[in-house]
């Protein structure tokens, strides 16, 4: 049998962990069960990661929040609400609308907060990366948004609470159009609030 490179094997083990977690829950994703799913000896998991903690850290890396790309036409003037709507749509395309990813994120958070350190730290890391993605949009669009009524940190947490709530409901009801309609509604509300504070019309 041909030898598999360690980085390739690590990727396979992360994929196996995700597969077991989605099908059976992370509590069932023991090292033995992961090795079975990946079709490798138990020792291979320990060789590639050293510990279950290191494997879970790799899983967290796999579901890291992608950058939110706000693509706007250079020659067009946008309202604040339109910019926020574009950002929400980018998030949904890159992360929010991936049902397996969202299920895995919630599974990870629920599992990690019940573990000893670094479990809670890894759970916080998932959210910190989401906050950072929103904060980058707020920073990049500073000229359009103007002075913000709240700190970027607080606004990033508020937006993440919205997107996570929409994604969680979407997992349950599986209504894609409604999820996007709700995000568009929040974009309009945020746009009005920010536009009003900046002294511009966003209607």
Image: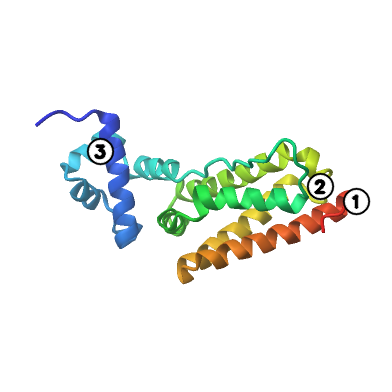
Work out which quarter of the rendered image holds the N terminus and state it: top left
Indicate which disc residue 148 carries. 2
- Decide which of 154, 101 is in the foreground and name it: 101
For the view shown, which residue lies furthest in the bottom direction? 173
One can see residue 50 in this view: no
Q: Nearer the viewer, mark 3 or mark 2?
A: 2
| Left or right: 82 in relation to 26 | right
- Circle 2: element type: loop
Mark 2: few/some/many CA within 10 Å (<14, 14-19, 20+) = some
- Decide which of 12, 56 is in the foreground and name it: 12
Dot 1 or dot 3, earlier in sequence = 3
Dot 3 or dot 2, earlier in sequence = 3
Mark 1: few/some/many CA within 10 Å (<14, 14-19, 20+) = few
Indicate which disc residue 199 carries. 1
Tell me the residue at 20%/30% (across/down): 4
Q: Could you say where residue 140 lies in the image, as x and y percent from the top left?
A: 71, 37
For the view shown, which residue lies furthest in the left direction? 1
């Amino acid at each position: 049998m041909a030898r598999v490179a360690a980085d390739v094997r690590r990727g396979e083990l992360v994929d196996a962990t995700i597969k077991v977690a989605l099908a059976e829950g992370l509590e069932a994703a023991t090292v033995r069960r992961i090795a079975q799913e990946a079709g490798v000896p138990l020792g291979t998991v320990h060789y590639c990661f050293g510990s279950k903690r290191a494997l879970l850290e790799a899983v967290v890396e796999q579901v890291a929040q992608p950058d939110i790309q706000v693509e706007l036409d250079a020659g067009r003037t946008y309202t604040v609400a339109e910019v926020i709507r574009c950002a929400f749509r980018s998030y949904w395309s890159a992360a929010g609308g991936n049902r397996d990813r969202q299920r895995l994120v919630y599974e990870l958070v629920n599992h990690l907060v019940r573990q000893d350190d670094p479990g809670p730290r890894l759970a916080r890391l998932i959210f910190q990366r989401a906050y950072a993605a929103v904060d980058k949009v707020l920073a990049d669009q500073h000229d359009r948004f103007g002075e913000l009524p709240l700190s970027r940190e607080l606004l990033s947490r508020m937006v993440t609470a919205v997107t996570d709530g929409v994604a969680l409901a979407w997992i349950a009801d599986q209504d894609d159009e409604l999820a996007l309609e709700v995000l568009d509604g929040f974009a309009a509300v945020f746009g009005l609030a920010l536009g009003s504070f900046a002294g511009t019309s966003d209607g």
